[in-house]
Amino acid sequence: MQKNIGKITSNGHAQVNGQKRTNGYVEPSEPWEPLFLEGLKDPEEALAYLNFCLREGELWDVLAAMQSIAKAQGGFSKLARETGLSRVNLYSALSETGNPRFDSISKVLRALGMQVTVEPLQKKKALRRASTSKLVKTQRTARTLSSRAKAKGKS
């Protein structure tokens, strides 16, 4: 067990084990955010962090993750240029009270080098292939009939 060694500094603050204390609060030795953002510069780390937030968190967690990744990978000005959205709209959409549209989220993710994908929750559902589902077959048939009708109309 470490023994607390303390002294009072000239400005009246206490120092315990070399760390400044003010009203019982010990200041951290190093800020965490720069280290955190440095890690998010790596695309694989950013992807893993965002996927974790999507699986485990609420909407605010996902928006905060996107905000942090945007800061780490060049900031909101760069993101605004790449998405075609204004910087103010990006700040608003990714804020705690933000309610972004899906196309805005998609644009931000593309600018960050990511995309939205959907996966089944359980292995049983994975066995049922999407290409054989009735809905997909119906959609394909409707598109095929529609494109044939358009082709006949042009000739």
Image (cartoon, rainbow, N blue to C red):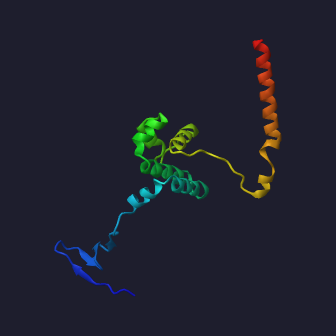
Q: Relative to residue 16, is residue 40 drawn left or right?
A: right
Taking the image as shown, residue 35 lies to the left or right of residue 153, namely left
x, y percentage for residue 153?
Answer: 77, 14
Q: Position of residue 119 (x, y in %)?
A: 69, 51
Closer to us: 105 or 48 = 48
Residue 9 in the image, given as x and y percentages of width and height? 19, 75
What number of labels is visible? 0
The image position of residue 92, as x and y in percent, is 45, 42
| Residue nearer the viewer, 124 or 88 | 124
Quarter that holds the N terminus = bottom left
Q: Name which quarter of the figure residue 19 lies in.
A: bottom left
Residue sitting at x 33%, y 72%: 26
- Figure quadrant of residue 152: top right
Image quarter hosting the C terminus:
top right
User: Would you say 31 lies left or right of 20 here?
Assistant: right
Q: Is residue 150 above or below residue 15?
A: above
Name of the residue lying farthest toward the top = 155
Left or right, 116 with respect to 112, comes to right
Comparing 19 with 42, the one in front is 42
